Amino acid sequence: MSFEENLDRVLSRYQELESLMSSSSPSLADEFVKMSKEYAELSPLVEAISSLRKAVEEISDLAVLITDADTDFEMKDLAEKEFSDLKAKIPDLKKCLQVMLLPKDAADSKNAILEVRAGTGGEEAGLFAADLFRMYQRYAESCNWKFEIMSLNETGIGGYKEAFASVSGAGVFARLKFESGVHRVQRVPSTESSGRIHTSAATVAVMPEAEEVDVNIEEKDLRIDVFRASGPGGQSVNTTDSAVRITHLPTGVVVSQQDEKSQHKNKAKAMRVLRSRIYEAERQKSDDERAQNRRSQVGSGDRSERIRTYNYPERRVTDHRVNLTLHKLDSVMNGDLDEVIQALISDFEARRLADIA
């Protein structure tokens, strides 16, 4: 299908939805909601098509005006300038449309489960993991997303061995999915008396939060163990067996949850994480089968891949996937991630366009 045929197909579907919604029966409420959602998703695309075709039409009219012998010199000069300006805009308008026409990741509209774990570097790695977790919390706040802390496994000196959160809102997974991987920090630890710079790491995983309809998990495939919750250092924080460990036997995925005093609540939280891990594993397998070069793409989600370095002495942040360096580390750690994330999204879209060119 040609580019123009694709645009015609979108416009035709948009008009069809308008007609169907205007004649929809009140008894078909669920169907109306589905059509309304699709209509809303197509609206920005229809506006972009309209802008492109209006520009093409104006260029055609200006060309006639320029070549008309009856057009006076001043009018022709203005027409030529406007003709050049519009012609220069056409490639950008077309590229914008091509990006909008790319097949959407079905998970982009989902909420996300965020996992941050301390990696190599001892206590300093735990402190860095806590810094990253707070960075994402502040970014979520700036986006008006809900950031629900699900579990914190603290080190006792302000660091985290691991931390889990549910992030919900508009476009959450679409913007956070590129954060999966190894984040490296270079700084002088507060406990370092000689002033030597240490390198530590933390691992981030961002998974689309799966709903029950997304993943079929049967009770017979689960082993559920309960035990007493414990805090930093192993001291008892609960006198009942409220902590829950769920093992999905077919895949070997294990999730533990102990933050709540209620065993029922811990199980519910653990199932949310388990469901999302299995869903993400299935997505990853499917993506790998479709594209063997996925590991070289931005957003591969490979947790062993070092994706970003936070250098405190130089106050810089470098994302190695797009060779982007920003000298505003304090701002980034305070949740100002838009510039980094947008660069990753733009690079990913450019790669996808190149693949289908």
Image (cartoon, rainbow, N blue to C red):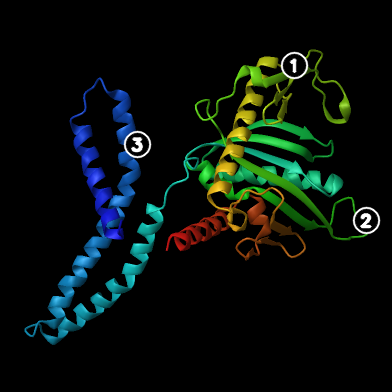
Q: Looking at the picture, does residue 111 appear above or below residue 302?
A: above
SS category of the residue bearing label 2 = loop
Rendered image: mark on residue 193: 2
Rendered image: mark on residue 242: 1
SS category of the residue bearing label 3 = helix
Rendered image: mark on residue 286: none
N-terminal of the pair, mark 1 or mark 3, is: 3
SS category of the residue bearing label 1 = loop
Camera-side mark, 2 or 1: 1
Position of 155 with respect to 87 (left or right) is right
The residue pinned by badge 3 equals 37
Under mark 3, the amino acid is: Lys
N-terminal of the pair, mark 2 or mark 1, is: 2
Under mark 1, the amino acid is: Ser
Q: Quadrant of residue 356?
A: bottom left
Q: Is residue 206 or residue 302 the one in the foreground?
A: 302
Position of 117 with respect to 174 (left or right) is right
Q: Is residue 75 visible?
A: no
Under mark 2, the amino acid is: Ser
